[in-house]
Image (spheres, coloured by chain):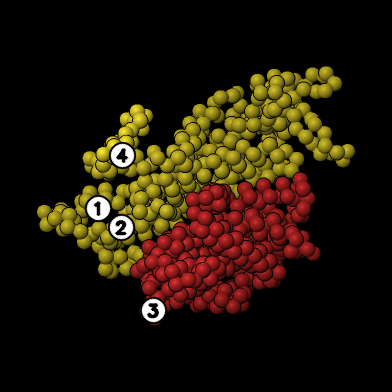
Amino acid sequence: MKKYLLKRIAISIVTLLAILIILFLMLEFMPGSPFNDEKLTADQIALLNAKYGLDKPVMIRFFNYVKNMLTGDFGVSYTISKNTPISQLLQSRLPISVRIGGQAVLLGTVIGLILGIIAALKHNTIWDTLTTIISVLGVSLPSYVFALALSYSLGFKLQWFPLLYDMANPLRSSVLPTISLCMFTIATVARFTRTEMLEVLGSDYMLLAESKGISGFQLIVKHALRNALIPIITVLAPLIVGLMTGSLVIEKIFSIPGIGSLLVTAIQANDYNVILALSFIYSAMYIGIMLVVDILYGVIDPRIRLAKGDKHE
Amino acid sequence: MNKQNEKIMFAEDDFELLHGDSISQMDENYSSQSYWRDVWHRFIRNKGAVIGFLCIVLIILLAIFAPHWNEYTYDSQIITNQNLAPRVQGLEKFGIFDGSESMSTSTGEVEVNKYISQDGAETGLEDTYYWFGSDVLGRDIFTRTWIGTRISLYIALAAVLIDMLFGLSYGLISGYFGGAVDNVMQRFAEVLNGIPSLVIVTLLIIVLKPGLLTITFSLMITGWIGMNRIARAQMLKLKEQEFVLASRTLGAPNFMIIFKEILPNIFGQIITNTMFSIPNAIFTEAFLAFIGLGVPAPMASLGSLISEAFKSFTTHPYMIIPPIIVLAVLMLSFNLLADGLRDAFDPKMKEM
């Protein structure tokens, strides 16, 4: 376990370092310099370079860069909002994205679990078929299809929910984005839960538990669900990837002022600094979550070691 | 005696002859079939997979031939014919696809038909038919949809090739040689896998221009890692087997063992996994196109069509429907086909 843990942490650190190197190189080789004003003389540029530490060797500049990134100093935005520190831009946006993403994960997991359990308990009935259809649809359709369908029907035609995100009314206006984001989660979780539950329900220890007289709710939750839950943790990582990419589109459709829509705007406006900062944040979040999921997996199920974890996609 | 005789008296219709298949209990052991025939039979029995396969074939045919079916091309703009609702010859007489659409104005919903004017004036469009309607620049959505489908199919093909060329060889070689080679190769893959593909695509787009090439590149960088794992796991399972040892004893070079001895034995898993990576790749393209990083205009892809039509989807919802339906059917079909192939190749993996 200890070896596995160390290995996972080492890989995460190397990955983060690799990303930092790539980002730094992109910054280095990007055409243009911050001081390309024609009025500046060579001496003045040299002075400015010295002031901002740009005359130092590459290694030192790299370490400065790493230090800045890790302390949250991402520099200033060039085009989106001129000379605003990026950390300031993020301050209001990050919580919104995290909240909507969190809502989607929570709602998706709960609904997915319920659907999966029902499908497994009522195996080969209409409920089972219904769950299978929902999960195939949820996996197959991009989240923006759901978003468009929902905003057209519930938002535009029926006017139950606002079409656009409203800062004054965050709960009501985040209903549609959350639902469209969590469809993929529902589908994946339901599918896995169903498979795992069927396997657990057919096992000998369930037969034993049943013959001991344990029944109903307790049997399902305490004996079946607990064991079925373990492999479901493995699908969390791909789900989070799905949420990250999904959030870009969803935030654009509902004009949510989160980091996803910021990235889209930054790409379209060629705002390098913002793109690099957001790339770093996305990577750091992703690596952190993957690490937590992997460690959690090892802690919850001691049978699983790296060798076995490799097989799961 | 009499009593007993009575007991065994039977009426004529007490018994009847059994007919047909109910008599002969067929033995379940039938002559051995080849692996591929077995797979074929299991596949054919899976209705969803067959339907998915037929849909894919249909979409491929439409993508090849449909853009030539009318006089419009994907980039010909006829400014006078903009925002026309779908109109199809024949069907217009039944009141559907007759070119009318409901517009919500300040005075309420109005039914508008831009092809035929209500007051009898000439519009010049009486003989014009846009099967799926026309967009804001007066381009034919029918042609554009099928041209856009070609992009998605190209991406599917690219995903297959990348899986086969990169992922497969990488995983097989890594698994076969093991030890330090395996360690280095797998750690590299893990580090690469730790970078979200979203970030890779974003950074690539800064360096290159948005377009098909960039999308293909980003698929090349991240698309093969899943396949690498499958191929490696299979290789680890098979490489200690006797037939590999026999081949090695006979002096077969490593290259031969990997690609001639082991590869044919894991072909099922490879095909299944490839099929699963296709919808992912199509999804990536559609996603990039939607946020404006897809193929540059006037070229169309399903994602960029959806993205364009999204801007006016509350006023002209017919524009967004064809690309969404084609995309949805395509994704669904590939998923169903992949599910079916997985069950056909490996019935043990079937989700009960």
For the residue labelled by badge 3, is the local secondary structure a helix, a strand or a loop?
A: loop
Give neighbour class at mark 1: few <14, some 14-19, many 20+ (Cα, 10 Å): many
Q: CA distance from mark 2 to mark 4?
A: 75 Å
Q: Is residue B33 left or right of residue A241?
A: left
Respond whether the residues carrying marks 1 and 2 are from the same subunit: yes
Instruction: Spot the red chain and give its letter.
Output: A
| Residue B316 percent location from the top left of the image | 72, 38
Q: Which residue is mark 1?
A: B262
Q: CA distance from mark 1 to mark 2?
A: 9 Å
Q: Which residue is mark 3?
A: A1
**Amino acid residing under circle 2:** Gln
Q: Colour of chain B?
A: yellow
Q: Quadrant for the N terminus of chain A, please.
A: bottom left
Residue under the image location 48 percent in, 47 percent down: B335
**Amino acid residing under circle 3:** Met
Q: Are marks 1 and 2 in contact (CB under 8 Å)?
A: yes
Label whose residue precedes the other's in the sequence (2 or 4): 4
Give neighbour class at mark 3: few <14, some 14-19, many 20+ (Cα, 10 Å): few
**Amino acid residing under circle 1:** Ile
Numbered circle sitting on residue B3: 4
Q: Is residue A137 left or right of residue B57?
A: right
Q: CA distance from mark 3 to mark 1?
A: 33 Å
| Residue A285 percent location from the top left of the image | 55, 69
- Chain of the residue on which disc 2 is drawn: B
Q: Nearer the viewer, mark 1 or mark 4?
A: 4
Q: Are marks 2 and 4 in contact (CB under 8 Å)?
A: no
| Residue B23 percent location from the top left of the image | 30, 36
Numbered circle sitting on residue B234: 2
Respond whether the residues carrying marks 2 and 4 are from the same subunit: yes
